[in-house]
Image (cartoon, helix red, strand yellow):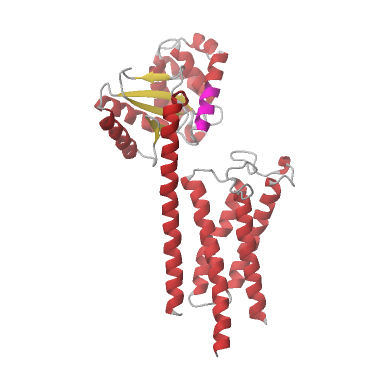
Amino acid sequence: MTNLDQTSNLNWTIIFICWFIASVSTLGSLFFSEIMEFAPCALCWYQRIFMFPLVLILLVGLFPFDKSIIKYALPLALAGWVFAFYHYLLYSGFIPESLQPCSQGVSCSETYVDLFGFLTIPMLSLLSFSTIVTLLFILKRRLSK
Amino acid sequence: MRKQDIILVLISAIFLVFMFVLGVSIYKNQQAKKYEFMALENASTFVREHSQTLGSDDAKVYLIEFSDPACETCSAFHPFVKKLMAVNPGKIKLVVRYAPFHDGSDYFVKILEAARKQGKYWETLEVMYKTQRYWASHHNPQPKLIWKFLPSAGLDLEKIRNDMNDPEIAKLIKQDLADAKTLNVRKTPGFFVNGKPLQSFGYKQLQELVEAEIKDAY
């Protein structure tokens, strides 16, 4: 019984961590745009579209713990990850600038924030999405066992 | 649903919101200090030689406005700024800086600066703001449309057409845009009162900031 309890506890905690990361990312991106007034570029908006709903969806999946949360959260997280990865490639110069989709308004490859010399905003986004996707996959495997 | 889970999520949520609010206040404080320093060390970033000003030279409160003739909010703020100056006669000096962020709106700045050579700067600005919705509705400035409104400011249009291409004017716009960038002005109108930025945007907030500075200075 205690063993079973511990497993379900860990499953809950995994979703909780995902929710926490999504919340930090959401508030962080709002801080950049609303407080520091960096206008979000087109790619940032696509990533926001997939990050913001995760906060609510994951929260709903926590009370009570609902394993089908993976089914709903994973597509969002994966789509966000694809945009974050693309943005990261564009940003670090692997994809030439001429191919970038946002030519008007805010450039997607301009550096606004550079923490500790390597953490940029697209990097932070990619990190959050990667962690959430990884955790959701781990949970998926645990539950299918 | 366990009670401790709910508490954990609640505490986390409160913690995150608290960190956000704390971040906001730290950031705003830092910015305010930065601008204060700049206002002391680099006053020319706020007011250039070429900047058009309105109000007494003895005024101790400098209201610096980064504006764009094609910006709707600037036009909406203009009567309010003038009212602020009328309520506090001789205490406020308005400094107009340009931040023509709209596509092609530097055209209107050029007209404005050309009008200055005819001594009709403020009349022209007034006409521009009043007729703005006809030539720049929905953030889509259409330079040609403005010409039919300009005569009401009493301008010699032929002279304007010549003067507006003066390279000095283009240089001035470039300088103002560079200063806007230095001062982190990304939206118009961008207000500074004696070097202090308007932290949260609005009529009331601007009035409060101006009144606080007047109280400090007089």
Left or right: residue B72 versus residue A71 is left
* Residue B143 visible in this rendered orientation of the protein: no
In front here: B213 or B198?
A: B213
Residue B73 on image: x %, y %: 42, 34
**Which one is in front, B202 or B31?**
B31
In the depicted structure, whether residue B66 falls above or below residue B24: above
Residue B1 vertical position relative to residue A120 in the rendered view, above or below? below
Magenta-colored stretch includes residue B78:
no
Magenta highlight on residue B179: yes
Please identify the quadrant where the C terminus of chain B is shown: top left
| Nearer to the camera, B70 or B166 | B166
Who's the residue at 72% across and 40% down the image?
A98
Q: Which residues are magenta?
A: B173-182
Where A145 falls versus A51 (above or below)?
Answer: below
Residue B181: x and y in percent read 53, 32
Residue A59 visible = yes
Image side of residue B195 versus residue A75, left or right: left
* Residue at 65% in and 39% down: A103
Hey, which quadrant is residue A18 in on the image?
Answer: bottom right
* Secondary structure character of the magenta stretch overall: helix
Where residue B57 sits: x, y (%)?
33, 17
Where is residue B176 drawn, in percent x and y?
Answer: 51, 25
Quarter residue B29 falls in: top left
The structure residue drawn at horizontal position 41% and vertical position 16%, both measured from the top left corner, is: B121
The residue located at (43%, 25%) in the rendering is: B43
Numbered circles on residues, count: 0
